[in-house]
């Protein structure tokens, strides 16, 4: 069981590093928002692994709150992007991405 936990933790750390790289590099605001949502998901997976290993349900309310925040954050960003597209505005991120 120790090897399995080590592999899972290693994969979570690798995915967290890759998502953090996407968060830093961008190139657009939407990429950063998706990366932030994925980072919250990786954190939730880590908390879930810790809860399973310790056989303690103490952190389950934390998972509930993180899932709610991740969902509302994603919906908020999607709504903001939709309103920005309806207004016909383009960000500097999208204009510079094609060059």
Image: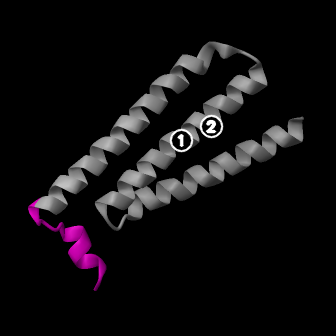
Q: Is residue 77 left or right of residue 88?
A: right
Q: Residues within 10 Å of mark 1 (few under 14, many from 20)?
A: some
Q: Nearer the viewer, residue 37 or 26?
A: 37
Identify the magenta region: 87-99
Image height check: is 23 above or below 90? Answer: above
Based on the picture, tell me whether residue 72 belongs to the magenta stretch.
Answer: no
For the residues bearing labels 2 and 1, Cβ distance under 8 angstroms = yes
Q: Is residue 99 left or right of residue 39?
A: left
Q: Give coordinates of residue 52: x percent, y percent.
A: 74, 25
Image height check: is 20 above or below 52? Answer: below
Q: How many marks?
A: 2
Q: Which mark is residue 41?
A: 1
Image height check: is 72 above or below 81? Answer: above
Point out the image quarter for the N terminus.
top right
The residue located at (25%, 48%) in the rendering is: 79
Q: Which mark is residue 45?
A: 2
Q: Nearer the viewer, residue 81 or 34?
A: 81
Q: Give coordinates of residue 23: x percent, y percent.
A: 42, 56
The residue located at (72%, 48%) in the rendering is: 10
């Amino acid at each position: 069981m120790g090897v399995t936990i080590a592999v899972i933790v290693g994969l979570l750390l690798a995915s967290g590093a890759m998502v953090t790289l996407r968060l830093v590099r961008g190139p657009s605001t939407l990429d950063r928002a998706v990366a932030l949502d994925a980072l919250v998901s990786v954190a939730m997976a880590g908390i879930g692994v810790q809860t399973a290993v310790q056989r303690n349900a103490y952190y389950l309310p934390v998972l509930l709150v993180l899932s709610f925040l991740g969902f509302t954050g994603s919906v908020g960003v999607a709504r903001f992007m939709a309103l920005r597209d309806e207004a016909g505005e383009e960000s500097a991120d999208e204009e510079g991405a094609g060059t």
